[in-house]
Amino acid sequence: MPQRTLPALARAAAAALLAVTAAAWAQGGSGGTSGGGLTPAETQALHNYVLSMDKLQKYAAASDELKKTVRTDTALAAEIKQMSDEPEETLADLRARITRHPTVLAYFTRQGLSTDDVLLLPMTLMGASLATSIKDPAKYPPSINPEQVKFVAAHKEEIDKLHLVSDDEDELGN
C-alpha cells in the first residue's frame, strides 16, 4: 500500500469531513460532537476561512518541500505514516494530530502558515472545488460559502498549477 504525504492525508480528511458535513446538512443539522461530524464551531471555521493565492502558494511550497524531503528521510516518512493511522473524524482530531507532529507542521509554519491554515486551507479548497459544480449556492453544505467557490472558479488555472487537488495518492514516488 502506498504511503501518503500530508497533502494526500489532508485531502482524505477533507473528503471525510465534507461527507459528514453533507450528511448532517441533509438531515437538517450541522453535525455535532456525538455523531462523528463537524461541530457548529468547526462548520463556522470552515465557512469563514478566506482562501488567497498567497496562502495557496505557501501551502504548495511547504508541501513540495515535504514531499522532496520525505523521499530521503525515513524518519519523516515513518512519522507521516504514523499520522495516517491517527483519528481524522473531526477538526479537533486533525488539530491534535498535526500538533503531535511538530516536525511535519514546521514545514508549513516556515512558510508563514498557521496551524489553522494547515487544517482549513486544504479542506476549504477541496470543498469549494467540489461546490463549483453546484449551480445554486443555497445548496452548498454549511461549511462552504459562496465567496470560497467564486475564488476557486476565478483562480482555477493558477490553483491547478499548484497541484494541491489531485487524485495522485502515491506522492512519495513509491
Image (tube, rainbow, N blue to C red):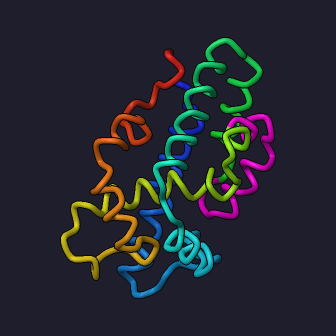
Along the horizontal axis of the image, is 99 left or right of 151? Answer: right
Q: Nearer the viewer, residue 136 or 82?
A: 136
In the rendered image, the residue lying farthest to the top is 72
Along the horizontal axis of the image, is 82 left or right of 125? Answer: right
Q: Nearer the viewer, residue 124 or 172?
A: 124
Q: Position of residue 18 (x, y in %)?
A: 44, 63
**Residue at image coords 31%, 65%:** 150
Q: Nearer the viewer, residue 3 or 155?
A: 155
In the rendered image, the residue lying farthest to the left is 135
Secondary structure predominantly adopted by residues drawn in magenta:
helix
Along the horizontal axis of the image, is 25 left or right of 134? Answer: right
Q: Is residue 157 above or below residue 132?
A: above
Indicate yes or no whether the magenta region holds residue 30: no
**Residue at image coords 46%, 85%:** 29
Q: Is residue 87 above or below residue 145?
A: above
Examine the image and state in which quarter residue 66 appears: top right
Counting every numbered tag in the picture gives 0
In the rendered image, the residue lying farthest to the bottom is 28
Indicate yes or no whether the magenta region holds residue 93: yes
**Residue at image coords 47%, 67%:** 20
Q: Position of residue 5 (x, y in %)?
A: 57, 32
Q: Position of residue 47 (x, y in %)?
A: 49, 73
Q: Which range of residues does the magenta coloring cover?
A: 88-107
Q: Is residue 70 above or below residue 139?
A: above
Along the horizontal axis of the image, is 49 left or right of 138? Answer: right
